Image: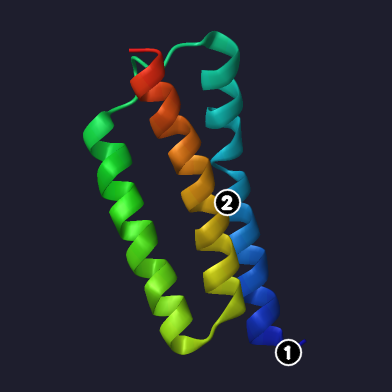
Amino acid sequence: MDFVTAIGLCAGTLTTIAFLPQVIKTWRSRSAGDISLSMLIMFLVGLCLWLLYGIYLQAPPVIISNFVTILLNLVILWFKLKYK
């Protein structure tokens, strides 16, 4: 693995893991009232665009990190709609 790929994987891992505490907090509290629906939707669209960009470039760090973050964002979005 080259240095640039290692940096990409590290950055992707950290930015993806940073979303995990929000997922856990929302799940435990059964409350998503303080989370903005418009932010979640805009973030999801941005993540999808990053994923497409990564696919176009064939860049595994971009593809993997954005795919996992999309999944986490969808979980929070589901909580937001479920726990209004």
| Within-10-Å neighbours for mark 1: few <14, some 14–19, many 20+ | few
The residue positioned 26% from the left and 30% from the top of the image is 37
Image quarter where the C terminus lies is top left
**How far across and how far down the image is residue 79, in percent?**
44, 23
Way the structure is coloured = rainbow
Q: Is residue 3 left or right of residue 24?
A: right
**How far across and how far down the image is residue 75, in percent?**
49, 34
Q: Is residue 61 left or right of residue 82?
A: right
Tell me which amino acid carries mark 1.
Answer: Asp
**How far across and how far down the image is residue 62, in percent?**
53, 72
- The tag on residue 2 is 1
Q: Nearer the viewer, residue 68 or 82?
A: 82
Residue 19 falls in image quadrant: top right
| Within-10-Å neighbours for mark 2: few <14, some 14–19, many 20+ | some
- The tag on residue 66 is none
Secondary structure state at the residue bearing disc 2: helix
The residue positioned 34% from the left and 25% from the top of the image is 35
When the figure is inspected, residue 37 is found, relative to residue 34, above or below; the finding is: below
When the figure is inspected, residue 79 is found, relative to residue 84, above or below; the finding is: below
Please identify the residue farthest to the right as the structure is shown: 1
Tell me which amino acid carries mark 2.
Answer: Thr
Q: Nearer the viewer, residue 54 or 18?
A: 54
Residue depth check, mark 1 versus mark 2: number of the one nearer the observer: 2
Secondary structure state at the residue bearing disc 1: loop
Total labels: the figure holds 2
The residue carrying mark 2 is 16
Q: CA distance from mark 1 to mark 2?
A: 21 Å
The residue positioned 39% from the left and 78% from the top of the image is 53
